[in-house]
Amino acid sequence: AAKAASLKAPLKDSTERPPQVVRRRIGRLAATREARALRPALARLAAHCLPCGETARPGRCRCTRARPHAPAATTPRARAASSRAASSGSGRVDTSTTMRRAPIRWRSLWASSFRRTAPRRQLSDALRSGDAAVGAANLDWTRIGFDFQRTNGFVKFTWSDGRWDDGVFEPEPYLKLHVMSSAIHYGQAVYEGAKAHHCEDGEVRLWNIRANANRMLEGSARMMMPEVPPDLFVRGCQWAVAANRAFVPPHGTGGAMYLRPYIFGHGPQLGLSPAPTFHFCVLAIPVASYYAGGLQPIDVKVARDYDRAAPQGVGNVKASGNYGSDIKVSIEARSEGYPTVLYLDPKEKRYIEEFSVSNFIGLRETRGGGMTYVTPDTPTILKSATNDMLMDLAGSDAFGMTVERRPVDVAELPEFKEVAGCGTAVVMMGINSITDGTTVHKYGSIENVEKLYTHYRAIQFGEKPDPFGWGTVCPHLNDVAT
């Protein structure tokens, strides 16, 4: 954008900048992504007569009048040849007066290039096909980060008159909503986070997707929205993945297809009551691994001046409004050097709840040399599906840990040998220290956290056996799309 802005400045007055300078400035940007929209303008520019600006076409332009139109020279060699022809009387006429009489409107030419061209990326039919190979989109898989990426589209189901429709696949990333939709005014919305992975055996698998379907049932009931049947939920996720197969990060890149199923109310609803219509949508977005170079422990601050959720509120469901209030808290913490915060219970400020967007895990040593996996349990905590799976893995024969889900007093922080957070997006994050006012609790190791993380990820990508049956193969597009 900055390059384009700098290019626009010289175009204000054609008498100040010779056309050759303008062409050189455009030419330097022609190969860049920002200047692709200029290519049609370059073609039109080359077809303009420099003296009068008339477009080249069969016939005559204003400045030549009695002789055929001569297109403008666009290269140094061609300009030199034109100059020689002019001196011999066989080429262009003298432009000393015509330039002043009819200056070329270069700025208008610039503007028209943007009006007449559509810079939107067009996806090929091969990428839109359900038969596309995994990773055929050829993105820079290790550097796409955790951000929105344009794909083939998303899946949308509509609930009206007491039933869900068969769903449609929307290619454009936009929704048309009524201005009085309850999701906008009253926050009647719930979302989920899930993943699909390209595994070592070549299959694409959805990861523990039924757990997300069941949690959305709880959220929909609390927020007075129609239930999304688990089979419909799973089919929507399968459809979104199958239709965007070309954008699934290939095995070995560490990336995954992040799924964002969400339900919200819309339609003309002024009073505070359930919406007349609902949409259930599923986005599929390729994301890179959070930790391309391994787990990096972070420092955390206890947020004593803020509450994540109200007692007997909606903290135990994934309501969209729960996360908007965390933005200010997180930004303030980052300004102090803390990537995230740890919330305490809103009633007594005594028990640990969870980090901004992930559950709390504490590992403590037992007298016999074993480890105990401890995670909080309060009425306002959103139970993480990832945490449930990590609890199963920690208690399995592979690790043999004792697992405890119970209220965890903040006074227990010094007793933990290792501390971590867990969630769908991050999987696990190691904690280096927790600052509570003037007290700093330091944890010198994440050895066992890293072992859990590595083993869990190996199961996700099919590199280790899956004795729990968490991964399910995603079927072909023709088997799930209507």
Image (cartoon, rainbow, N blue to C red):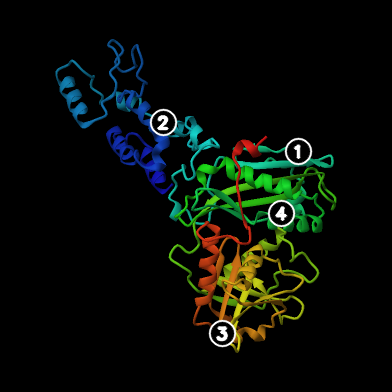
Q: CA distance from mark 4 to mark 2?
A: 54 Å
Mark with earlier residue (3, 4): 4
Q: CA distance from mark 3 to mark 2?
A: 64 Å
Which of the pair 83/73 is nearer the observer? 73
The residue labelled by disc 1 is 165
Local SS, label 2: helix
The label nearer to you, 1 versus 2, is 1
Q: CA distance from mark 1 to mark 3?
A: 53 Å
Which of the pair 374/304 is nearer the observer? 374
The residue labelled by disc 4 is 213
The label nearer to you, 1 versus 4, is 4
The residue type indicated by label 2 comes to Leu
The residue type indicated by label 4 comes to Ala
Local SS, label 1: loop
Local SS, label 4: helix
Classed neighbour count for the residue bearing mark 1: other residues with Cα under 10 Å, few (<14), some (14–19), many (≥20) = few
The label nearer to you, 1 versus 3, is 1
The label nearer to you, 3 versus 2, is 3
Local SS, label 3: strand
| Residue 324, image x, y percentages | 67, 61
> Position of 156 compared to 108: left or right?
right
